[in-house]
Every structure is written in C-alpha cells, then in structure tokens.
Image (cartoon, rainbow, N blue to C red):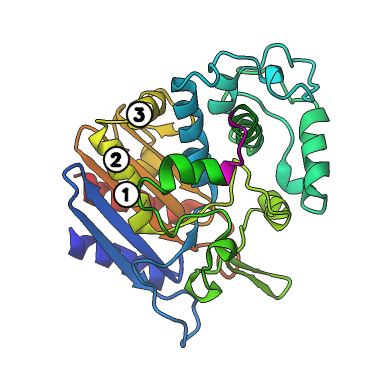
Amino acid sequence: MHNEIEARAKQAIEERVFPGCVIGVVRSNGEREVFPFGNLTYERDSPAVRGDTVYDVASITKSIPTASLALTLAAEGKFALGDKLVTYIPEFRSKWREEITLEHLLRYGIHGLQLSTLKDKTSGEILESAYSRELADTPGTQFLYTNLPALLLGIVIERTSKGTLDVLARKYFFGPLGMRDTTFFPQKYGHGVSIFAPTETVDGDEIRGIVHDESARVFAKAGKAVGHAGLFSTVPDLLNFLERLLRGDEGFTKSIIAGAEKGLGWQVNDARFMGKYAHPRTFGKTGFTGTSCVVDLERGKALVILSNRTFPKRPKNDDAIYQLRADIADIVLE
C-alpha cells in the first residue's frame, strides 16, 4: 500500500496538482501510517512537508467539528434536529422561517446567500445579510452545497451551549482526543507560521496561518470561529478523531455515526472522492484547499488527505484533486 500511495502522490506533485501533501491511514485497532510527500511550495528551497505539517482543512470544518458537535449536542438534549431554526435565531427573516429546521441545515437543504460575495463586509454585516437575504427556493426541495447552512448551525450550537465554537470543539473533541495541533486560531495557541502550508497568493500576499475561505477570514480577523470553514489541523490529529469513529464504542461516537450514515453534516457513499469501493456505510468530507477524509465502518479503515492544491493559485476546476482522492481511496479500501 505504501508504494502505491507514494507513486500516486508523486505523480500528483509532478503534475502540479499540489506542491506537497500528507496522507494518513488508520484502522479500527489503532494501527496507523502517515506519509508526507513533497514541499510546502513549488520553490526549490521550500521546506519539505512533514507528517505534522498544519493545513487549512477548509470545509472539513463543516463536519469536524460543526456537524459532529450538533449531533453530539442533540444526543445530549440541548436541542432536537426537528426544532425550528427561528427558535434559536429569531433574527432570521426568510418567508420560510417557520418551516426551516436544524435538520435542513445539516442536510444543506436551504439555498441562498453566497458568503464569499461578502468578503469586503464586516462580520456583523455578513451575519445581518445571512439573516435578512431571502432564500432561492423552498427549504428541503434539493441538496445544494453552500456555506450558509453551516454558518447558521454554528450559531445555533453557540447559543444553545453558551460557548464559542472553538472552545466547545476543544472541550468535546480536540482536548479529549489529544488533537494538540487542531485549532481555529493558530496564533492563539503559539503555532509558528513556518509550520503551515500556505493556501494561496492573493494580490502578492501569501495566505498562511489564517483561513483561506474569504468570509471565514473576516470572522477570524475579528476573533470569531464559524461553522463553515476556518479549522487548521494535521493528519495525525484527524486520524485520532476518525479512529474513535471507527471504534464507535463510547461517548459521542454513536450519535455522530448515526447521523453521518444518514448524510447529516457528512457526505455518504460518494465515489467521486471515496472511490469505487465506497458503499452506504462509507462517509466523509472534502475541503476546497485540497483536503478530504473518508471513514469506512465495514472495513474498519479511515483515511485523510491534506494538501494545498490552491497554491499559488486555485486551479480552474476540481478534476485533478478528485481523481487523486478517488485513487488514494481505492488503494486504501481495496
């Protein structure tokens, strides 16, 4: 397996899918392997990627920790997934406000505001727009992947638990699981910028150590964590989380697995990045920066891919990264 993973990762580097990556595999018995490849950038003197290089995981944030927190808190009775959104965010003013439930958020069943268009607004202005802009169509009519549901879900989590998203994530997951390098605010925890893989160069400035997602960056600069993006992590840390899900034998894991298998906050049986061996008990998540994680409960295996495929400029399409993800999943799950 190692040789196949290495060959495929090096092929991707040669094809400039990304300058480097870290790939990790864990089994339900705790056995794990972590494979770093390439460099942080395409420069000749760029530092080599290490097994503990920190990456911006982008939309994996939506599942770890946001959806996982929601499923855990629901199991604790903090709220029910059938509760109306306006119960917790009365400022939300859509004409469908009385129909939207928390489950709609977990299923990405509301379609409206594109948050990235508000990158020049303040965090308060973004929230006001999220509350006041009308949705595109009736809630729950179709799946449409946007950042808005996870942003709103993060707010519900904070209001029902009287804590910030970053603190709650550390309390429930990152602390107990020994995820020392996982955080929304790298500088706050003393991480040096040099250990981060940069995500993009914009107007001559390298984005490194602060979230790549435009709207989440506005909140991060204001010291606020949000539910749709902003988490930084390493492959070993994420394997800690996925290993616990594979074991599924204690604490928060049962509620997360039960929700994930129903597509609540996670993607299920998606061959585009889970490969041809995916099945109804395979779930995971991808991130725009070139990240992904996959959990296969029947095979007792999970994998993580972290990369910075958006560096120095985001590619024109996602074809190359999806092919890499699927190929690695095939190698691991075969």
Q: Please state the extent of the stretch shown in magenta in the rendering.
A: 161-166
Q: Is residue 2 visible?
A: yes
Is 164 magenta? The answer is yes
Q: Are marks 1 and 3 in contact (CB under 8 Å)?
A: no
Residue drawn at x 45%, y 71% is: 19
User: Is any part of residue 64 visible from this angle?
Assistant: no
Q: Earlier in the sequence, mark 1 or mark 3?
A: 1
Q: Secondary structure at mark 2?
A: helix
Distance from Cα at disc 1 to Cα at disc 2: 7 Å
Which residue is at 58% across, 70% downward? 312
Q: Are marks 1 and 2 in contact (CB under 8 Å)?
A: yes
Q: Is residue 284 above or below residue 47?
A: above
* Residue positioned 24% across, 49% down in the render: 26
Residue 322 in the image, given as x and y percentages of width and height:
43, 50
Q: Badge 1: how crowded within 10 Å, few (<14), some, or many (20+)?
A: some
**Residue 76 included in the magenta stretch of the image:** no
Which numbered tag is attached to residue 244?
2
Q: Earlier in the sequence, mark 2 or mark 3?
A: 2
Amino acid at the residue labelled 1: Asn
Q: Is residue 294 left or right of residue 214?
A: left
Q: Quadrant of the N terminus?
A: bottom left
Residue 81: image location, x then y, percent? 53, 18
Nearer to us of marks 1 and 3 is 1
User: Mark 1 highlights which residue?
Assistant: 240
Residue 327 vertical position relative to residue 297 in the rendered view, above or below? below
Instruction: Give the number of the mark in front: 2 or 3.
Output: 2
Q: Position of residue 234 (x, y in %)?
A: 41, 59
Q: Label 3: which residue?
A: 257
Front residue (pair 159, 298): 159
For this orientation, the residue located farthest to the bottom is: 45
